[in-house]
Amino acid sequence: MKYYPNIIPESADAGDVCRHFALSDAACGRLRVYVEALRAWQRRINLVSARTLQRVWVRHVADALQLLELLPARTARIVDLGSGGGVPGLALALALEAGGPEVLLVESNAKKCAFLRHVVHKAGARATILQRRIETLDPVAIGCDGQTVLTARAVAPLPTLLGLTEPLFAAGAQALWHKGRGWRAEVEAAQAAWRLQWRSHRSVTEREAVILQITDARHV
């Protein structure tokens, strides 16, 4: 799969996004089921910002799928923190083919878990939903190790997110976290209390946003 560092235009539709990420017809079909469900359930519960639904394929699907090329080759599991409306974890699970990493969707809200379960069942995604708060995760119970990648979008500021996931990093996990235009300030704030090994990757959906890759995080 080739990775394109350019910004995907907001006018891109389902076909554009599926071609951009070289998805199979089956994977694109699963993502169409997700988008249809997201639009239907959004009328009942707040899953994503309502104003983004007209650009859902870029603002949510492509935003999630850009992690595909950044996953380390040895990734065996993805633990998506605060999965909410399914970005990025559920979208990744729908795009991945058989034999890819297993996906664990962690969400504390019961209604949002119901949405995630609905899409997993209807689209046939290879994902497990865990209704739990992030800070209660047991690294051993979820199989967290050096082949685990933590994902999260719009969950918490970086210092807070690091505090919530300290046991997972101690077990060997890495992270690929979506961060917006204030990401540099978040990194600065985190480095006051954390020793980090990190790099940033420019987002393909928003010019001032990045994917923050953290390969090691230790509280000091």
Image: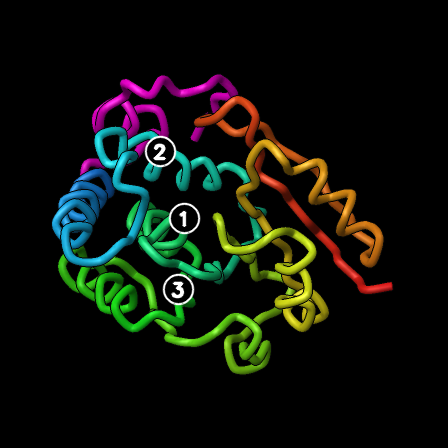
Q: Position of residue 5 (x, y in %)?
A: 52, 21
The answer to whether residue 107 is above or below residue 14 is below
Q: Secondary structure at mark 2?
A: helix
Q: Are marks 2 and 1 in contact (CB under 8 Å)?
A: no
Is residue 178 in the magenta section? no
Report which residue position mark 2 lands on. Answer: 59
Q: Earlier in the sequence, mark 2 or mark 3?
A: 2
Is residue 80 rendered to the left or right of residue 99? Answer: right
CA–CA distance in space, label 2 to label 1: 11 Å
Task: Name the magenta segment's main secondary structure.
Answer: loop
Report which residue position mark 3 lands on. Answer: 105
Q: Earlier in the sequence, mark 2 or mark 1?
A: 2
**Label 2: how many Cα within 10 Å (few below 14, some 14–19, many 20+):** some
Q: Position of residue 214 (x, y in %)?
A: 68, 49
Is residue 40 rendered to the left or right of residue 85? Answer: left
Is residue 10 in the magenta section? yes
Residue 61 circle label: none
Q: Position of residue 32 (x, y in %)?
A: 17, 41
**Label 1: how many Cα within 10 Å (few below 14, some 14–19, many 20+):** many
Q: Position of residue 42 (x, y in %)?
A: 19, 50
* Foreground of the two, 179 or 100: 179
CA–CA distance in space, label 2 to label 3: 20 Å
The answer to whether residue 212 is above or below residue 115 is above
Q: Quadrant of residue 31?
A: top left
Is residue 71 rendered to the left or right of residue 63? Answer: right
Image: magenta residue range: 1-25
Quadrant containing the C terminus is bottom right
Q: Earlier in the sequence, mark 3 or mark 1?
A: 1
Q: Residue furthest right?
A: 220
What residue lies at 65% left-to-right and 52% top-to-bottom?
158
